[in-house]
Amino acid sequence: MKIVLIGLTAALISVASFAMNNEHNMDHGGQQTQSQRIESNGITLSNFYARASIGRTKNSGIYGEIQAVKTDRLVSISTSFASAAELHEHINNDGIMRMRKIEGGLTINPGQPMVMKPGGYHIMLVELHQRLIAGNSIDLTLEFESGKILDISVPVVSIKKIRH
Ligand SMILES: [Cu+2]
C-alpha cells in the first residue's frame, strides 16, 4: 500500500510540474494580453500596458499603476526595447497640452496609487529599437530610491484598447 501511495504522489508531482512548464512556455512564446501584477518588498505594479507603435513613430508610452506600502520614489526606468524610458507628465500650456519630462523622479505615497494613463503621467519610450506590435510584450525595469528594483513584462496593446 505504501509503495502504491508513493507512486501516486510521484505521478501527481510530475503532472503538476508539467502544467507549470506549460504556463511558463506560454508566457514567453505566446501572446500576452493580460497585464501582470507584481508584488515585491511592499511595492505593487498593476495594469501595465505599452501602446502599440503607430506607423513609424519612434516613441511610445507605457501606462500602469504603482502602489507602495512605505513612501518611495521612482527614480529610474529602463527597457531593452528603447534607448531611453522617461517619466513624463502632461501640462496644459495656454490651452495646449504638452508633455514634459519629470526630473528627479516621482514620489509614491502609501494609500495613494500613482496612476499613469493617457493624458497624465506616463512612461515615454524614446528611440524604439523596433516597432511595438500588439500581442507582444516588452520587458520593463523600475528602480526606486529605496534601492528596490522590480521587473515586469508589459503587454503591448492597440491604443483603442487602452482605457482612459
Ligand atoms: Cu511623453
Image (spheres, helix red, strand yellow):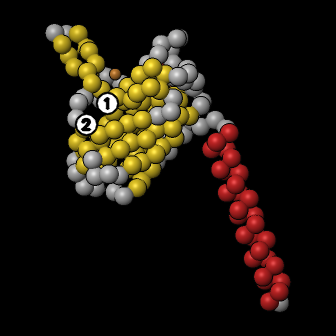
Task: Locate the N terminus and report the quarter of the image it occupies.
Answer: bottom right
- Against 15, is 58 above or below? above
**In the displayed structure, does residue 29 sit left or right of residue 142?**
right
Q: Amino acid at mark 2?
A: Gly
Percent position of residue 104, x then y: 22, 35
Q: Residue at x 56, y 34 (%)?
A: 137
Type of residue at label 1? Leu
Mark 2 and mark 1: Cα distance apart in space: 7 Å
Which of the two residues, 52 or 146, is positioned nearer the viewer here? Answer: 146
Locate residue 78, reporting x and y percent. 42, 35
Q: Secondary structure at mark 2?
A: loop
Q: Is residue 143 left or right of residue 57?
A: left
Residue under the image location 65 percent in, 50 percent down? 24
Q: Residue at x 75, y 76 (%)?
A: 9
The tag earlier along the polypeptide, 2 or 1, is 1
- Where's ligand 1: which quadrant? top left
Residue 90, image x and y in percent?
A: 26, 22
Q: In terms of image quadrants, where is residue 34?
A: top right
Locate the C terminus by quadrant: top left
Badge 2 vs badge 1, beta-carbon distance below 8 Å = yes
Residue 124 visible in this rendered orientation of the protein: yes
Using a 10 Å C-alpha cutoff, classify the residue at mark 2 as few (fewer than 14 neighbours), some (14 to 19) or many (20 or more): some
Kindly identify which residue carries mark 1. Answer: 87
Q: How many marks?
A: 2
Q: Is mark 1 within 8 Å of ligand 1?
A: no
Crowding near the residue tagged with mark 1, few <14, some 14–19, many ≥20 C-alpha atoms within 10 Å: many
Decide if residue 160 is in sight here. no
**Residue in the image at 38% along x and 25% along y:** 124
- For label 2, the residue is 105
Secondary structure under the numbered disc 1 in the rendered image: strand
